[in-house]
Structure formats: C-alpha cells, structure tokens
Amino acid sequence: MCAGILRVLQQFMSETAARLVLRGTLEPLRLSLESATRAELPRIIEALEPATRHFVDPVRKPQLMTQLKLLLSTSPASNGVGATAAPSDVRATTYLVRTEADASHARLAAKVMCESMGGRGYECQKVATAVSELARNQISYAGGGTIHLAPQLDPKRVLRVSAEDSGQGISDLTRVLSGTYKSKTGMGLGLLGVKRLADRFDVRTGPDGTQVEFEVWL
C-alpha cells in the first residue's frame, strides 16, 4: 500500500523527499511503512495534504491530491503492494537546525537517505543517531547550525554528513574525544559517540564555531 503512495509522491518530488514526507506523516499516526494497511489509506491521504506543503508547487498540489485519492478506488493488486522503490534519486541536501523539530527532521531525513541508498537497518540507525546528537548539540550550545547530507554512490556507497555552527567552539577537544573530559555544561557530550559510530570522522573547532564531518560506509 505504501509503495503505491510513494510512487505517486515521486512524480512530484525526489524519492528521498517522498520517503521523508511519508515517514513524517505516518509517525504521528502511529504507523510505519511496514504496518500501514489499506484500511488506513483515507487518513494517510488526509494527513499528506499539509505534510506535502513545502515539497510540492501549489499549482501542482491539486493534481497530487487527485492522484493520491485515486488509490482509494484502485484494486490492491494495482496499487503497488509488495513493490520495491525505484533506484534512488538521492541528492545532497542541507537542513537548517534551530529547534527540536528541526533536529528530528534532520534525523529522519538522514535515515531515509541512508535507506534510499540501500543501507541496512543498523547502518541507517547509526547515521540517524549521529545526526541527532550533532543537531541537539548545535541547538543547546551554539544556538543552532546546519546539517548537510551528501550521498556518494560510486565507486562505493558512502553517506557523508557535515555539521556546522557558529558557536564558541569546544574546549579541550582532545580530552573530549578521548572520553576523559567531563563538562559541567555538557558541551561536547555525544561527540565521542558520533566518532565511534562513524567509519570516518573529523572535527575542527575554534572561537568562530565547530565543523564536524563523518562518513558511514554502506
């Protein structure tokens, strides 16, 4: 059932965006791509109308909703049940992080991009966890920042994540990364965890801000 919805959404946005929108729509409904059934289709379509607001040209929005509603009248065999998504249309994307909602959005986007690249469950969970840690640190200690997701499909699949902020930097970075530094404010907390989750990790910090880059190899 969700495969049919994804196929419609992908006519109006990239596969990555379509998966992001659909997952973000299903979560508040306490559904998942695997658990959603045809009986849930009417309320999923209703929830998709506001969820697609920032992804679809307003001129094309009525066409999108019409095609989604057509799924209600198609037979189960024709709506894509059991189908797999088309090869990835995965593009580099930057997310502005200012609020907890932004952090959650970036986390979900990273997980969806990883899945779109063919990443396995534990690999995508690593990416999502690391992005969440970095985004929350940006909010708590730098007033926000940006998360940039950059997929590489050839010669090997790599998801590269860059996080930048304009905060005051991290003191005692060497001790933070060694696990021996205990900050009263919590600054730098989680950075060591990100390093352990990553296949490649680099961080630069100073009075003008912090830049963290890591890769997960898929």
Image (cartoon, grey):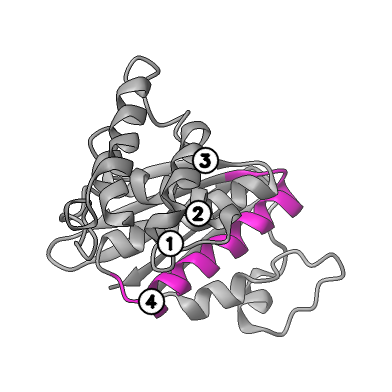
Residue bearing the label numbered 1: 36
Q: Secondary structure at mark 3?
A: helix
Mark 4 or 2 closer to N-term? 2
Q: Residue at x 37, y 23 (%)?
A: 61
Residue 35 placement (x, y as % from top left): 43, 68
Farthest residue, direction left:
155
Q: Residues within 10 Å of mark 1 (few under 14, many from 20)?
A: some
**Pointers 2 and 3 in contact (C-beta within 8 Å):** no
Residue 4 placement (x, y as % from top left): 26, 50
Task: Please name the amino acid that badge 3 sits on.
Answer: Ala
Task: Please name the amino acid that badge 4 sits on.
Answer: Gly
Estimate the spatial distance between the alpha carbons at disc 4 and disc 3, rounded to whole Å.
Answer: 26 Å
Which callout, 2 or 1, points to the residue nearer the camera? Answer: 1
Foreground of the two, 133 or 207: 133
Residue bearing the label numbered 2: 26
Task: Please name the amino acid that badge 1 sits on.
Answer: Ala
Query: Which span of residues is magenta-colored?
Result: 119-145
Check residue 114 in the rendering and tell me which mark sits there, or answer none: none
Which image quadrant: the N terminus? bottom left
- Image height of 199 relative to 5, above or below: below
Which image quadrant: the C terminus? bottom left
Residue bearing the label numbered 4: 121
Q: Residue at x 37, y 56 (%)?
A: 38
Which callout, 4 or 2, points to the residue nearer the camera? Answer: 2
Which callout, 4 or 3, points to the residue nearer the camera? Answer: 3
Viewed as shown, does residue 21 lie left or right of 131? left
Foreground of the two, 144 or 132: 132
Q: Residue at x 75, y 64 (%)?
A: 187
